[in-house]
Amino acid sequence: MNTRKSLLALSLLAASALAHAGGEYSFANVSANWLDWSDRTTQQSGKQDFGYLEAEGGLGAKWGELYGFFDIENPGKGNGNTQGRDRRFTTKVVGRYNLAEVGGVPVQLYGHIYDTRGNGPADRHFFTQNRVLGLGTDLSFGALSIKPFFGVHNQMDALMPAGSASGYNGFMTGYVMLYPFQAFGQNLMLTQWHETEFNRQDKFIGAYKAGDRPRVGQNGAVALWWTPTKAVTTGIQYRYADQKLGSTAYQNAVIYSIKYNIK
């Protein structure tokens, strides 16, 4: 309970700071979201659809960028429910620090921490934290912005009663893409985030069968956002994962979102 309260307090403090921070840009929002797994994914993995609340914020300045979010999944549920419907907490913080420029292209120190945890019954407690440190850059082509990264992947897992693992887990590369545009007089934006993990270690994929342990995993989402007023943004996302999320099968879902834009 203390850990969850600390995560919530830190996330709310970070969101408030990002909303009021100075710089070239800053934004913050809170949202309600519903994730609807495909029927095939539900049948293959047993995953259940769920709702989640999110606080999100970011800022950019001459030194670099900072972005983060905090999710409460299944907010109306307690601990001890079944079929994956326990309350869960997910936090992600991403930082990019401008080190230099090469031919007008920034070279950035890149780092992110992704933390997800749940406290179900004693046989389903879990905690996973992914830490990546490496290099990134920021490329622009007109209105299109692509921000790739590459880094060393360090992971910490705890799954009861299966045990725990910690340490080096290969490498991770990926990107964030943003493309704002107007159509029919409306403000729209196309976004994508994608991550590829490779050279993953046995101690983190031991839950798979010995001949089925995937060394490479894919994870991401493509989204279309509509901002009809300054205060409100709605969106639909296609969420996908391959050799990830505890399954060797391809998994996909649709996420429906509505955001209140604080800034």
Image (cartoon, rainbow, N blue to C red):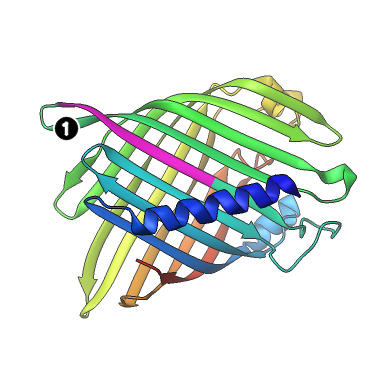
In the image, what residue occupies the spot 40% across and 37% down?
A: 174
Residue at the limit of the structure toward the right, as seen here = 122
| Location of the C terminus (image quadrant) | bottom left
Image-based side of 22 in relation to 93, left or right? left
Residue 151 at x, y percent in the picture = 43, 25
Task: Name the residue beneath numbered marker 1.
Answer: 105
Kind of residue at badge 1: Val
In the image, what residue occupies the spot 36% across and 45% down?
A: 176
Residue 260 at x, y percent in the picture = 44, 72
Q: Element type at marker 1? A: strand
In the image, what residue occupies the spot 57% across and 33% down?
A: 130
Q: Main secondary structure of the magenta part?
A: strand
Q: Is residue 89 magenta?
A: no
Res. 214 visible in picture: no
Segment colored magenta: 92-101
Res. 111 visible in picture: yes
In the image, residue 190 sits, relative to residue 139, either above or below, namely below
In the image, residue 64 sits, relative to residue 47, either above or below, namely above
Q: Nearer the viewer, residue 254 or 44?
A: 254
In the image, residue 120 sits, relative to residue 255, either above or below, namely above
